[in-house]
Image (spheres, rainbow, N blue to C red):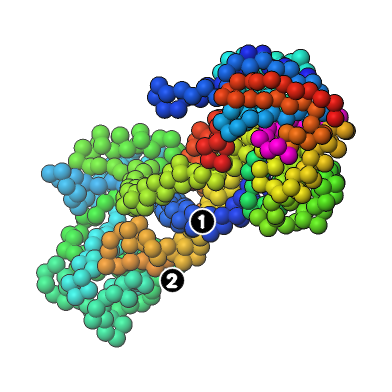
Amino acid sequence: MNRNRYFLDYTLVSLWRRRWKNAALIGVYSAMVFLIASILFFGDSLRRDAAVILQNTPEVVVQRMLAGRHALIPEAYAAAIGQIRGARNIRPRLWGYYYHPASQANYTLMVPIDFPYADDQIKIGHGVLRTWAAARDNQLFFKAYDGQTLALSVAETFSGETDLVTADLILMSAATFRRITGTPEGLATDLVAQVRNLEETRTVAAKIVERLPDTRPILREEIQRTYDTIFDWRSGYVLVAMGGAVLAFFIFAWDKASGLSAEERAEIGVLKGVGWDTGDVLRMKAWEGLAVSLTAFVIGVLAAYAHVYLASAPLFEHALKGWAVLYPHYHLRPVFNGNTLGVLFFFTVMPYTLVTLLPVWRVAIIDPDAVMRQFG
Amino acid sequence: MIDLQHISKTYQQGRGHAVTALQPVSLELAAGGITVIQGPSGSGKTTLLSIIGLMCRPSTGRIYIDGRETTSLPEHFAARLRRRTFGFVFQNYNLIKGRTVLDNIMIPAYPEGEPFSRLRGRALELLERLNLADKAGRPVTALSGGELQRVAMARAMINNPTVLIADEPTAHLDTRLADRFLAIAADLAAEGMTVLAASHDPRVCNADCVGTLISMHDGRLLDNKQSMP
């Protein structure tokens, strides 16, 4: 106990002695931890939000496939699916995309189960209100599939808290949706179904394909996996883009570590000469490496936390949220993920500590007499 | 107490080039008193001191300290024996810059892990004894040559060693300070400590307090002179 206290004390005084050099090192190191931690925190938060959103979605979405492409599905298919044991609450959905040339943006059109407003009214997300060009007197003008113009008035807007999923959303009645998109009566965009026993989801999906061979059931877990993959891919893309910075840091660390100054080498020789053994020197230097890397780790993680959860990650949002005219404005909710912190610790603190120990070990195993003759 | 049997040391300098610093030497050093190894630069004095003090391993031969063979000791045990048996005063003192006098004195005792208050108390006692009590909190870079040497002596004594090894202890000192060093060495020898010094300074070699004078030349031992102080 006392020994380690002495070694730690020795280390802290040594760090203070070279305080400007170490401050610069900690600055660069913290910046690297900050970049990586920001990306990991961002990914964690988006994945968690996606999981929460998907929790309330139906277990199975059934699409009709025609020539390998998604086609409109007859609403009558719902009855056939309803006969499968375990499937329930089967209902058709109407949704699609609407490109508005003046805004140069794509919006999502959707028909909710119970739309409380009239056919010429809509409920829209904040992003729509923000970006829709030429909105007049609370009215938005749509060009229907047949070229006719429809004026729809905004009855309600979603609250800003739901911006992540509602930013580009326009809710309308089924009749209005069919009028704009030209979707015929009796056809829907897709069907959704719930499954009584979640363990049976795959069995139900297999039976749907068996009875309706031109359909493709998509399971909620598959959508979840797709979201995870997208976020992983985006995080990976940004990490690769930052690879240069990370590499530069490791070169810097290696240079610092392998380039023990003559003074540092002589000091190791003196310590051994007055009775320290190789283990004592390594222990002292390990404290030094840990003190630097842990300080940088804590600073980097706290800065990343503030950057992602307090400031909504302004440095990476364009790369990580995706590319769109219509960026949703939302606050990421903090997620504590022990795995993320563990991985970050393992890949930032451990390598630095080990890299700094290697050259020390090479000097420390030499006879103190030889070290002092060479560098003293 | 220290028995060297056929000790030699050869340094490898680059590929295929070896320099013999010490020819095979056998020597017995009794406990207590002051022993001085004299000889010109390059005669092997420092190498012999380093080998005796377990600062480097001999190329051949064996060393016995109090009857215990030490040449084959694992590094960890050799370091512990070095720490507890020997105190070193290096030619250039080799104090650690950027640290206070008190820190420098306590550093050799850190691996022992004894309570801080006890260690600090002993270090302050040594400073008091060497008239450096008022310098305890000063950085070593602010000291004069004589003060640096006394700090180095205090550091050498912090672990209560039985042997004090000093390499060219008066090389950087004027006559007054050299006399002071000899007086301190004589005091330590009187208390039972073995003082072993390498020097080519006549002030040291001819000092009355020196009990044994060993001469070296080109890595070989010449005649030994023993006298009672």
Asked whether the residues under marks 1 and 2 belong to the same chain, the reply is: yes
Helix, strand or loop under label 1: helix
Query: Measured along the vertical axis of the image, is residue A187 above or below residue B50?
Result: below
Name the residue that disc number 2 marks: A159
Instruction: Determine the residue positioned at 29% across, 74% down.
Output: A131
Name the residue that disc number 1 marks: A21
Q: Nearer the viewer, residue B48 or A171?
A: B48
Dots 1 and 2: beta carbons under 8 Å?
Answer: no
- x, y percentage for residue A275? 68, 33
> Magenta region: which residues?
B192-203
Figure quadrant of residue A152: bottom left
| Amino acid type of the residue tagged 1 in the rendering | Lys
Dot 1 alpha-carbon crowd within 10 angstroms: few under 14, some 14 to 19, many 20 or more? few
Instruction: Determine the residue positioned at 88% across, 33% down.
Output: B191
Residue A370 forms part of the magenta stretch: no
Instruction: Determine the residue positioned at 40% across, 65% down.
Output: A314
Residue B96 seen in the current view = yes
- Which chain is disc 1 placed on? A
- Which chain is disc 2 placed on? A
Residue B197 forms part of the magenta stretch: yes
- x, y percentage for residue A61? 31, 47
> Looking at the figure, which quarter contains the C terminus of chain B?
top right
Helix, strand or loop under label 2: loop
Figure quadrant of residue A208: top left
